Image (cartoon, rainbow, N blue to C red):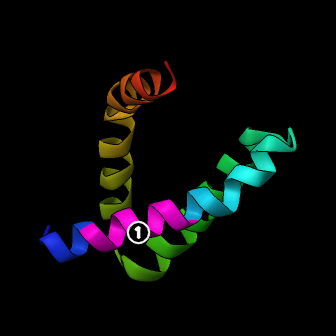
Amino acid sequence: MSPNDEQQMTEFANELTRFLLPHFKENKNPLMFAGVLMSCAMELYTASIKDNQDIYHLLEVVAASVEDIREKNNKTLH
């Protein structure tokens, strides 16, 4: 990933966080947000990736990162 791609990804993540944070503060269900975002991600994947096997592989890679993400979140929250 190029430094420019990384910067764009960080900026997008920050914008998304700024959008979602007020909703979290209103005690809305974070699982609903996660489900909607996951559905959007799947729609983007299926529109961009023609071979379902490639999408399945991508999801396996994501699933393998759950522990790392949880650890990162725990460090951020504490």
Residue 59, position as x, y percentages in the image: 39, 49
Q: Quadrant of residue 67?
A: top left
Amino acid type of the residue tagged 1 in the rendering:
Glu
Label 1: element kind: helix
Residue at image coords 36%, 62%: 10
Q: Main secondary structure of the magenta part?
A: helix
Q: Is residue 9 magenta?
A: yes
Give the labeled residue for mark 1.
11
Residue 28, position as x, y percentages in the image: 85, 43
In the image, taking residue 5 as reference, residue 51 lies left or right, namely right
Can residue 46 be seen from the camera position used here?
A: yes
Is residue 4 or residue 52 the one in the foreground? 4
In the image, taking residue 32 as reference, residue 72 lies left or right, namely left
Residue 72, position as x, y percentages in the image: 37, 29
Is residue 65 or residue 43 the one in the foreground? 65
Residue at image coords 65%, 47%: 34
Residue 61 lies, with reference to residue 12, above or below; the image says above
Residue 62 lies, with reference to residue 75, above or below; the image says below
Can residue 52 be seen from the camera position used here?
A: no
Question: Split into 4 quadrants, where in the image is the N terminus?
Answer: bottom left
The outermost residue toward the left is 2
Q: Quadrant of residue 12?
A: bottom left
Residue at image coords 45%, 70%: 45
Residue 13, position as x, y percentages in the image: 46, 61
In the image, taking residue 4 as reference, residue 17 lies left or right, namely right
Crowd band around label 1 with a 10 angstrom C-alpha radius: few (<14), some (14–19), many (20+): few
Is residue 65 or residue 73 the one in the foreground? 73
Q: Quadrant of residue 4?
A: bottom left
Residue at image coords 45%, 21%: 74
Which portion, as a residue range, is magenta?
Answer: 7-15
